[in-house]
């Protein structure tokens, strides 16, 4: 719990140095907000968080070869008291829902005005959740639908593996799946290999047949 007398300590994670510098300068000008540092990739971000203990992490979704979604999940698991506020160019439903499921408390677009950024930082630091108005209703509907589904196909798969299999069944290649799920190419390759093993498919073509027979990739 933040004390009224202590500043909100913020770390900025983004692979673009100009954005990091600009955001750090903006945050440094705000009352009762302290920038503890910035990082350009997952390894540097985890080290920064470990050593400085920020209250809020501003997180981009694309970090070069790293995924902001995966990093968000890792941060929340290792440091449950840290609030992750996603700030990205991605406005699609898949990115919003993936961020929420990973544990992010907020989601802003990089075009947000300075006062919106300040308001979001103070909100997530106080334990609130902030989502862009255009995507909030759709995101919550998608999450709710996923949790209340009557029958889950391929129960042996994790939720992420099922998402990957669904996209494979729709004919998407690994590069496209990587972009849609905001995952690194290596992670997608690993998920595909695990899926093939779990459903007993010898190759991608066979997996598509099995997936469609199970109801994935059809709508």
Image (tube, helix red, strand yellow):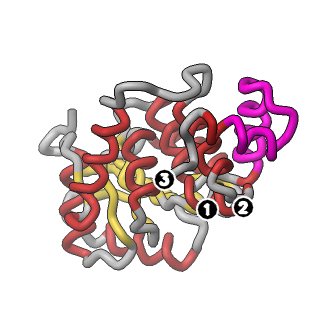
Mark 3 to mark 1: distance in Å? 20 Å
Secondary structure of the residue carrying tag 2 is helix
Mark 1 to mark 2: distance in Å? 6 Å
For disc 3, the marked residue is: 219
What is the number of the mark on residue 175?
2
Q: Magenta part of the protein: which range?
A: 186-210
Residue 16 in percent (x, y) is at 58, 73
Any part of residue 61 in sight: yes
Which residue: 35% across, 79% down? 111
Mark 3 to mark 2: distance in Å? 21 Å
Quarter of the image where one finds residue 40: bottom right
Which residue: 39% across, 44% down? 54
Residue 52 in percent (x, y) is at 47, 43
Looking at this view, name the residue that lies furthest to the front. Answer: 213
Which residue: 54% across, 53% down? 68
For disc 1, the marked residue is: 179
């Amino acid at each position: 719990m933040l004390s009224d007398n202590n500043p909100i300590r913020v770390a900025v994670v983004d692979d673009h140095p100009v954005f990091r510098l600009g955001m750090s300068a903006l945050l440094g000008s705000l009352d009762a907000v302290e920038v503890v540092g910035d990082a350009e990739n997952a390894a540097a971000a985890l080290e920064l968080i470990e050593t400085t203990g920020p209250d809020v992490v501003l997180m981009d979704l694309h970090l070069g070869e790293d995924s902001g979604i995966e990093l968000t999940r890792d941060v929340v698991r290792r440091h449950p008291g840290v609030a992750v506020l996603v700030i990205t160019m991605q406005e699609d439903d898949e990115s919003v829902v993936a961020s929420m499921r990973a544990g992010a408390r907020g989601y802003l677009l990089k075009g947000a005005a300075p006062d919106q950024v300040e308001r979001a930082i103070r909100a997530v630091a106080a334990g609130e959740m902030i989502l862009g108005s255009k995507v909030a209703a759709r995101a919550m509907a998608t999450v709710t639908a996923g949790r209340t589904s009557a029958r889950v196909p391929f129960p042996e798969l994790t939720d992420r593996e099922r998402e990957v299999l669904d996209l494979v069944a729709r004919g998407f290649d690994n590069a496209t799946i990587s972009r849609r799920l905001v995952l690194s190419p290596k992670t997608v390759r690993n998920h595909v290999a695990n899926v093939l093993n779990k459903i007993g498919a010898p190759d991608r073509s066979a997996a598509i047949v099995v997936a469609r027979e199970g109801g994935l990739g059809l709508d």
